[in-house]
């Protein structure tokens, strides 16, 4: 199916009154006309609209679209990226199990494994973003291999086919956080990964006004996550938030195309700049990971990092305080260009003092580059 068809018409067949903008079903419950229908819905909530902690028509439209974009069978939205990630993880673990997780995972995912799950007797080994390292750290009781590619902050790329092949042969569930690339640029499930996770707070909603998450994969796996973690833990999304994502999805492809084009221009400027030590963006031809990245992604998003040639926090401060277009804020994926200096975080290591993460927004690339140029001149 053509991507634009998924983003517009697909899954919206039941839109009442032929409404082109699918309605927000702001209802918590659905009624039944007879005993048998009610009984059927109660025994298979997954297939019916019964109560909005389970399914809701507006939410369902978005889930079906995201499943189609991910080229898989099903998906479920959650109240945040972390609700989707934690629900997916918990569905496949019990006390005594082991997880292999990439060291460079999103900070809260890292904490989930390192602190939270330890309380329940689950042990995690954190490994570098490399297929061989991941494989060699698997144990007989490993149940999940948790991946990010590209990874958070350093945007390292992992050979996904290699990890997926190994995991399949050994009966281990593989999960990837696909927030960075989105299904517009990367389809991990086609490469053999079992579950694709997203913070929908980023590009899916795309306007810095929603917190949400999604997990996508084969029906059997999603069904297990839905009937256990989603219904029990209840981290569900509200219909209005789902509708905002539906609206955001209309422009997902066109926004990402622009983010990618602008980011390549920004990288052209940053690579080889005399005040910059290294640029981390795998989808630029100058990246050492370009060949691998290109073999599993069709493009790149607007998030990258670089290192200033300095070890001084004062220089980093001066640089970010000189930026006018880039605003200092967490998160990313909306219209705006954003910046986070690693040094601002409490747990920033000495070696990462000079690390700066930026989100290249939808403003004109000339404006964005001029802003970076000006700030670099100040340091
Ligand atoms: C933001 C983010 C998350 C967490 O998502 P929330 O919606 O904030 O819960 C997870 N992974 C990545 C890569 C993220 O950027």
Image (tube, rainbow, N blue to C red):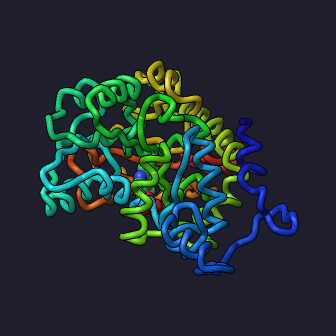
Q: Position of residue 139 (x, y in %)?
A: 14, 35
Image quadrant, ligand 1? bottom left
| Towards the viewer: 38 or 368 | 38
The quadrant of the image that shows the N terminus is top right
| Towards the viewer: 51 or 344 | 51
The residue lying at 20 percent from left, 58 percent from top is 117
Residue that lies at the very extreme toward the front in this rendered image: 36
Q: Position of residue 33 (x, y in %)?
A: 68, 80
The residue lying at 71 percent from left, 39 percent from top is 3
Left or right of 348 in this view: 50: right
Left or right of 310 in this view: 238: right
The residue lying at 48 percent from left, 63 percent from top is 78
Residue that lies at the very extreme toward the top in this rendered image: 291
The residue lying at 61 percent from left, 39 percent from top is 184
Up-down relation of residue 109 to residue 165 (above or below): below
Q: Position of residue 194 (x, y in %)?
A: 41, 39
Q: Position of residue 220 (x, y in %)?
A: 45, 47
User: Which picture quadrant has residue 230?
Assistant: bottom left
User: Which picture quadrant has residue 320?
Assistant: bottom left
């Amino acid at each position: 199916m053509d991507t634009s068809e998924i983003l517009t018409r697909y899954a919206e067949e039941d839109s009442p009154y032929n409404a082109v903008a699918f309605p927000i079903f702001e209802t918590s419950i659905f009624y039944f006309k007879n005993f048998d229908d009610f009984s059927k819905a109660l025994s298979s909530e997954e297939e019916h609209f019964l109560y909005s902690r389970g399914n809701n028509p507006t939410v369902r439209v978005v889930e079906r679209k995201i499943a189609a974009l991910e080229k898989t069978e099903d998906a479920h939205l959650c109240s945040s990226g972390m609700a989707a990630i934690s629900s997916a993880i918990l569905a496949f673990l019990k006390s005594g199990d082991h997880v292999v997780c990439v060291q460079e995972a999103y900070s809260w995912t890292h904490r989930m494994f390192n602190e939270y799950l330890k309380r329940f007797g689950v042990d995690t080994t954190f490994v570098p973003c490399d297929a061989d390292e991941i494989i060699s750290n698997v144990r007989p009781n490993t149940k999940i291999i948790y991946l990010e590619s590209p990874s958070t902050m350093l945007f390292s790329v992992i050979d996904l086919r290699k990890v997926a092949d190994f995991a399949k042969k050994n009966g281990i569930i593989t999960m990837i956080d696909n927030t960075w690339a989105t299904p517009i640029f990367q389809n991990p499930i086609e490469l053999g990964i079992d579950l694709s996770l997203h913070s929908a707070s980023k590009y899916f909603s795309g306007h810095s006004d929603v917190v949400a998450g999604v997990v996508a994969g084969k029906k059997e796996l999603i069904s297990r996550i839905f009937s256990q973690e989603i219904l029990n833990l209840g981290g569900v999304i509200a219909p209005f938030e789902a509708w905002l994502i539906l609206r955001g999805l209309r422009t997902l492809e066109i926004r990402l195309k622009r983010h990618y084009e602008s980011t390549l221009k920004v990288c052209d400027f940053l690579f080889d700049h005399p005040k910059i030590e290294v640029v981390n963006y795998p989808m630029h031809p100058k990246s050492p990971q370009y060949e691998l990245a290109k073999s599993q992604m069709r493009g790149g998003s607007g998030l990258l990092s670089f290192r200033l040639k300095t070890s001084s926090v004062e220089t980093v401060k001066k640089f970010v305080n000189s930026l006018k277009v880039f605003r200092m804020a967490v998160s990313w994926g909306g219209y705006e260009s954003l910046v986070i200096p690693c040094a601002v975080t409490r747990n920033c290591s000495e070696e990462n003092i000079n690390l700066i993460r930026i989100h290249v927004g939808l403003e004109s690339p000339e404006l964005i580059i001029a802003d970076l140029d000006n700030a670099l001149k100040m340091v």
